[in-house]
């Protein structure tokens, strides 16, 4: 089994979730505990919230007796690993002018995919993660949101969870959603059957889903995050056309354009050896030339500006 199979099966599990308005949920007790939140504002002074779902950061997880488990147990060490990405995203993408919420959840580890587990076991793991993230979102809505507009966002496994939330949220909640940032994961025709999932086509539209995944050549797409994408937006120019947009990343001149045959981003000019500070993943199932693990690094200043821009346009309504 490929090390990436957990993402494919997580995507399959999404298809079992009906896309229809849900009754007002009854939050569980788990997310009443502060230790289940990496980021939980003590006061909310901003007009808009962000609800962020972390990616697959845990490679391996172990029970107290040393047995490996394929669902993270959320030890202090694991929480610190999750917090590293969450706080990077808070600092670099969603600024202090937004109220930032980020729960911990017992995510499926990357090692689960490499272990040769039966398909039904992997789907069950993903379904549990989706249910838990939905519980966190329900608790946030019931106790913290107070009717404010909000952004939902996630990266990699977190992007899959974000799509699940779009299916889970009520129509009233969706009406207050500024945008959804599904970073590092594609949206296919089946996903678009949900009326809460509307592809972004520009820099200013609201109630939309922003989606992209990146590589140096279309031939290097990673099928499990590509997901037969039917839409993609350039996070530099905020257009869906194939015109290249120049940008600078860590002092290196680069450019990016949408490839409309696969609906992916093609990035030119990146040389990883020029950026030794970038941490590589321990388990790396990506084809060479695929830039999935750089998705929340390349475009952060542009995502930050765009999030604030969409908030302004939403609030003007």
Image: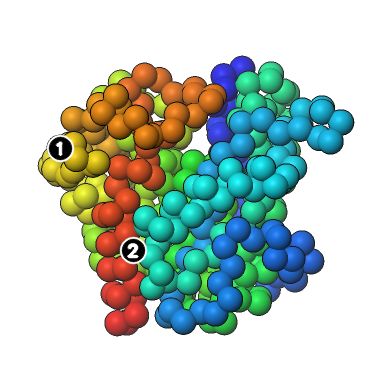
Q: Residue furthest front?
A: 277
Quarter in which the N terminus is drawn: top right
Residue at position x 77%, y 28% in the image: 68
Figure quadrant of residue 14: top right
Q: Residue furthest right?
A: 65
Figure quadrant of residue 288: top left
Query: Total marks drawn?
Result: 2
- Is there any visible trace of residue 287 in the rendered image? yes
Where residue 125 sits: x, y (%)?
Answer: 71, 38
Is 247 left or right of 72, judged from the image as shown?
left
Task: In the rendered view, tell whether residue 253 sits above or below residue 4.
Answer: below
Residue at position x 49%, y 41% in the image: 156
| Mark 1–mark 2 distance (CA, rounded to whole Å) | 24 Å
Task: In the rendered view, tell whether residue 30 sits above or below residue 97.
Answer: above
Residue 9 versus residue 289: which sits nearer the camera?
Answer: 289
Q: Which mark is residue 253?
A: 1
Q: Which mark is residue 143?
A: none
Is 240 left or right of 287, judged from the image as shown?
left
- Is there any visible trace of residue 229 in the rendered image? no
Q: Mark 1 or mark 2, which is nearer to you? A: 1
Residue at position x 18%, y 36% in the image: 252
Residue 307 versus residue 212: which sits nearer the camera?
Answer: 307
**Badge 2: few (under 14), some or many (20 or more) residues near its Cα, within 10 Å?**
many
Residue 105 versus residue 118: which sits nearer the camera?
Answer: 105
Residue named by callout 2: 307
Residue 296 versus residue 311: which sits nearer the camera?
Answer: 296
Where residue 15 sits: x, y (%)?
Answer: 59, 44
For the residue labelled by badge 2, is the local secondary structure a helix, a strand or a loop? helix
**Badge 1: few (under 14), some or many (20 or more) residues near its Cα, within 10 Å?**
few
For the residue labelled by badge 1, is the local secondary structure a helix, a strand or a loop? strand
């Amino acid at each position: 089994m490929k090390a990436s199979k957990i993402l494919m099966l997580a995507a399959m599990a999404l298809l079992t979730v009906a896309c229809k308005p849900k009754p007002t949920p009854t939050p569980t007790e788990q997310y009443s505990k502060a230790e289940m939140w990496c980021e939980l504002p003590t006061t909310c002074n901003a007009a808009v919230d962000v609800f962020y779902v972390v990616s697959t950061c845990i490679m391996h997880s172990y029970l107290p007796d040393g047995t490996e488990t394929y669902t993270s147990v959320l030890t202090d060490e694991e929480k610190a690993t999750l917090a590293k990405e969450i706080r990077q995203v808070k600092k670099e993408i969603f600024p202090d002018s937004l109220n930032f919420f980020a729960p911990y959840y017992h995510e499926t580890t990357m090692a689960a995919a490499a272990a040769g587990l039966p398909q039904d076991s992997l789907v069950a793991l993903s379904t549990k993660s989706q249910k838990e993230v939905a519980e966190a979102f329900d608790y946030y809505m019931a106790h913290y949101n107070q009717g404010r507009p909000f952004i939902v966002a996630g990266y990699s496994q977190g992007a899959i969870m974000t799509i699940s939330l779009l299916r889970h949220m009520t129509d009233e909640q969706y009406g207050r959603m500024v945008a959804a940032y599904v970073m590092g994961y594609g949206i296919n025709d089946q996903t678009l059957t949900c009326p809460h999932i509307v592809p972004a086509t520009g820099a200013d539209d609201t109630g939309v889903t922003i989606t992209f995944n990146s590589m140096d050549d279309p031939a290097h797409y990673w099928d499990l995050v590509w997901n037969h994408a039917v839409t993609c937006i350039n996070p530099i120019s905020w257009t869906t056309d194939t015109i290249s947009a120049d940008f600078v990343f860590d002092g290196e001149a680069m450019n990016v354009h949408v490839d409309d045959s696969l609906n992916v981003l093609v990035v030119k000019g990146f040389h990883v050896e020029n950026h030794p500070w970038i941490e590589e993943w321990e388990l790396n199932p990506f084809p060479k030339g695929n830039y999935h693990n750089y998705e929340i690094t390349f475009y952060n200043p542009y995502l930050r500006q765009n999030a604030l821009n969409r908030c302004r346009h939403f609030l003007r309504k």
